[in-house]
Image (spheres, helix red, strand yellow):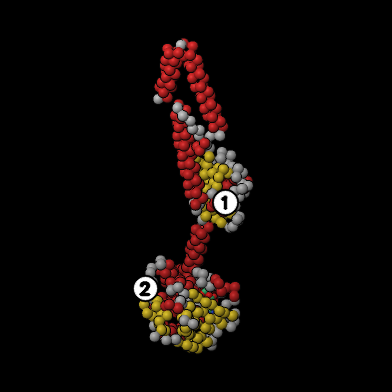
Amino acid sequence: MLWLRSLIYYLAITLISLFTGGIAGAEAGLTLACVLLSLSVCFHLYNLGRLYRWMQHPRVDNVPTSFLLWQDVFDKLYEQVRNQRKNQDKLANTLERFTSAGEALPDGVIILDEFDRIEWCNQAATQHLAIDRNSDVWQVVTNIVRQPSLREYLRTQDFAHPLLLRTTRPTEQVLSVQLVPFDSTRKLLLSRDITQLDRVQMVHRDFIANVSHELRTPLTVVGGFAETMMDMPEMEPATRARQLQLMVDQTQRMQRLVDDLLTLSRLENGQQLKEEEVDVPQLVRLLQAEAEGLSQGRHTIKIAQIAAAKLIGNHDELHSALGNLVSNAIRYTPPGGEITLSWRLEQGVPVFAVQDSGIGVSPEHIPRLTERFYRVDRGRSRATGGTGLGLAIVKHILQRHQGQLAVKSKLGEGSEFAARFPGHRALTD
Ligand code: ADP
């Protein structure tokens, strides 16, 4: 204990002075006591000075050292400063970890103060809302993100639901923005990029609208004729027969649509491809026979080339995809036209191609042909029994085989639709 040691030092000085006084007289004892006490005061003043100087620039590596009582004081000081430094380092580390975690978040995070000024934001927020961290910090967020709906959202203070923001800067995006109040004045403004989700929802909505539209016409026709027949039991047999035939045609159209929708949904469910060795040369001959059945002698259907190669894939899916290409060639080629099938290896790449001398497609339509319900000529597609889903099915099946559809076409001259497969799927003897 410091006070006890101090007491012992001063007792020692007193005893030495008394002892000297006893031997050499009172005057000598007093003089010695004065000298020792003066030395002690000088020692304390000197160390006090060093302590004062250190306090002006306190660092852990320059804590003074001394001896006797002052060494205890400086040791204690060193220990405290070192602990304080450790705590500071720990705090700084924790803060850095939180900041890095905030930076790494895929969602945007902005801390707003009570006046909605930006205190801090992470990298994702700068990208979502075009915030410049150098100049926009401490600016009111609605001055940077100039969206009336965000201003309104902050004003109403109803943060139960997220706000949907469509931004054009820095890129076109759809953001879901949510405000979360924390401590008594601050708020977190969280932003999430839902552009992809919004697109999927839009495709979904369009799809439902398209299916409904496709079903409405045949349903109206069937319903209309059924009502007429009920109202006119005495209808002429020839008229009745004609109307019944139209009802059957429309029912078949709905059946084809439902079949194609089910095929697409099966393909999209992404069940693993059941692979087998598909005898493509045999399949090509089967497709030619089916094409002749469909064409009923209106077209010339030839096979240009059949490579002696099999393909690793799924027979039924390939039959469906290649069959779609062949039936399209017949449907979009006027009578008298020529359709040529080929199965070839182009530098090891297996290709099935259907060439026709039909109506062709102009270049701007080609990239969109595989979209669901996309048709160049809606009337012609319907008249020939099309559902608008054939090439979407082809694309899916080819994707499942890591293949691609390549289309070459000239308006009024004809087209070539080629299914290209990866080389490793070809089996040659
Ligand atoms: P559809 O049932 O309408 O034929 P698809 O998905 O099979 O639907 O084809 C989409 C569109 O691509 C067709 O509506 C048609 O306009 C065009 N198309 C497809 N194949 C050919 C072809 N061989 N020649 C010309 N146009 C074609």
> Mark 2 or mark 1, which is nearer the start of the sequence?
1
Image quarter where the C terminus lies is bottom left
Whether ligand 1 has any atom under 8 Å from the Cβ at mark 2 is answered as no
Image quarter where the N terminus lies is top left
In front of the other: 334 or 9: 9
Residue 123 drawn above or below residue 286: above
Q: Which type of secondary structure does the marked residue at label 1 adopt?
A: helix
Question: Residue at coordinates 53% horizontally, 57% vertically from top-left?
Answer: 195
Mark 2: amino acid: Lys
In front of the other: 162 or 399: 399
Q: Are marks 1 and 2 in contact (CB under 8 Å)?
A: no
Mark 1: amino acid: Thr
Question: Residue at coordinates 52% horizontally, 29% vertically from top-left?
Answer: 51
Residue found at the very far top of the displayed protein: 26
Q: Which type of secondary structure does the marked residue at label 2 adopt?
A: loop
In front of the other: 259 or 140: 140
Question: In terms of image quadrants, where is residue 317?
Answer: bottom left
Residue found at the very far front of the displayed protein: 24
Camera-nearest label, 1 or 2: 1
Question: Residue at coordinates 55% horizontally, 47% vertically from top-left?
Answer: 121
Question: Residue at coordinates 57% horizontally, 51% vertically from top-left?
Answer: 126
Query: Residues under labels 1 and 2: Cα distance?
Result: 47 Å
Q: Position of residue 52 (x, y in %)?
A: 55, 28
Residue ID for mark 1: 126
Q: Position of residue 381 (x, y in %)?
A: 52, 75
Task: Please state if 117 lies on the left or on the right of 233 as rendered.
Answer: right
Q: Residues within 10 Å of mark 1 (few under 14, many from 20)?
A: some
Residue ID for mark 2: 274
User: Does residue 83 appear in the picture of this structure?
Assistant: yes
Q: Residues within 10 Å of mark 2 (few under 14, many from 20)?
A: few
Q: Which mark is residue 196?
A: none
